Image: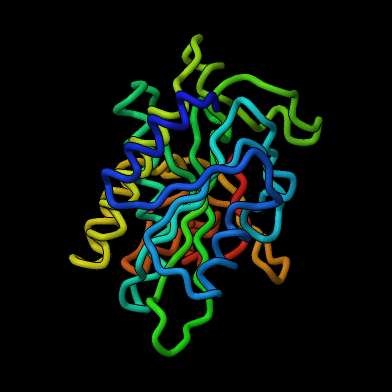
Amino acid sequence: MSCEEWKRLAAAAEVAGIRAGFTARTGSTNDDVMARLAAGEPPPFLLVAEEQDKGRGRMGRQWFSPPGCGLYFTVALAAGEPGLVPFASLAAGTACATAVRRLTAAEVMLKWPNDLFLGGRKLGGILCETPPSAPGRTKAIAVGVGMNVNAGAAPPAAIRNRMVSLEEILGRKVCRAALLTAMIREIRTAVEELWRAGKEAVIARWQELDWTRGRELEWVSLSGERVSGTGCGLDPGGRLLVRGRDGRIHAVLSGDITVS
């Protein structure tokens, strides 16, 4: 990100009341923000990295984060009621998809629980984490986002065919600073609305962008159980519903989803 891009981003973040910081390279913005929260720094604040060498996704997977082409950031926000915190990932997903759609018209969809999909491939992912609570410390949540914006270094062969960038689909480069500003605003609005109004609107909006609904998929549970079936949306608890080949409905809370 150029100096001018960073200045525009920082100014926009400050206007929104979020302290913004930038680092050329780090292990993981989520790790850095979680450490700052654990040390007592109050939200809201934002950390953006040009490159990560230990970017993380769900289940400890690494997120490919080369310099000069993607967005890798974590925003720390005040947390709401504990019962609503698990829905923050869904809220952040709809926020990011909405921001990209409004800025670029790219038809970004959502794959349960926290992936952004475009053209049937993964555009980005979201990782929400909460630090241990402590007396006198503001309860907080770290919302981490990684997104493939413009073309850059070739990803590892194992994931190359599963990834996509906005530039690849749109045929043009996208201003990362403008996109980041839009995403931060949408995330903060969506998460604060979740705390204020509850989960129902979040689930309804997520289902409007559900890429798995009606598609053949396979669910692999953490214990190794495999179920093949069809995506049927979310239940009121935010769990993915999968209709198995035998007609039974499975409510998925964890594990891996692969779409055929």
Q: Which image quarter holds the N terminus?
A: top right
Between 251 and 208, which is closer to the camera in this rendering? 208
At 68% from the left and 68% from the top, the residue drawn is 222
Please state the horizontal and vertical placement of residue 12, each as a whole percent of the image: 32, 37
Can you say whether 69 is above or below 254 in the image? Answer: above
At 71% from the left and 71% from the top, the residue drawn is 223
**Residue farthest to the right?**
157
Q: How is the image coloured?
A: rainbow
Image label count: 0
Can you say whether 209 is above or below 119 in the image? Answer: below
Can you say whether 152 is above or below 194 in the image? Answer: above
Side (left or right) of 189 relative to 256:
left
Instruction: Report which quarter residue 58 is drawn in.
Output: bottom right
| Residue 230 in view, yes or no | no
Please state the horizontal and vertical placement of residue 69, each as a whole percent of the image: 60, 26
| Residue 151 in view, yes or no | yes
At 42% from the left and 35% from the top, the residue drawn is 180
Q: Which image quarter holds the C terminus?
A: top right
Instruction: Report which quarter residue 76 is drawn in.
Output: bottom left
At 18% from the left and 65% from the top, the residue drawn is 197
Can you say whether 27 is above or below 195 in the image? Answer: above
Between 201 and 32, which is closer to the camera in this rendering? 32
Instruction: Report which quarter residue 13 is drawn in.
Output: top left
Please state the horizontal and vertical placement of residue 66, each as a whole percent of the image: 69, 32
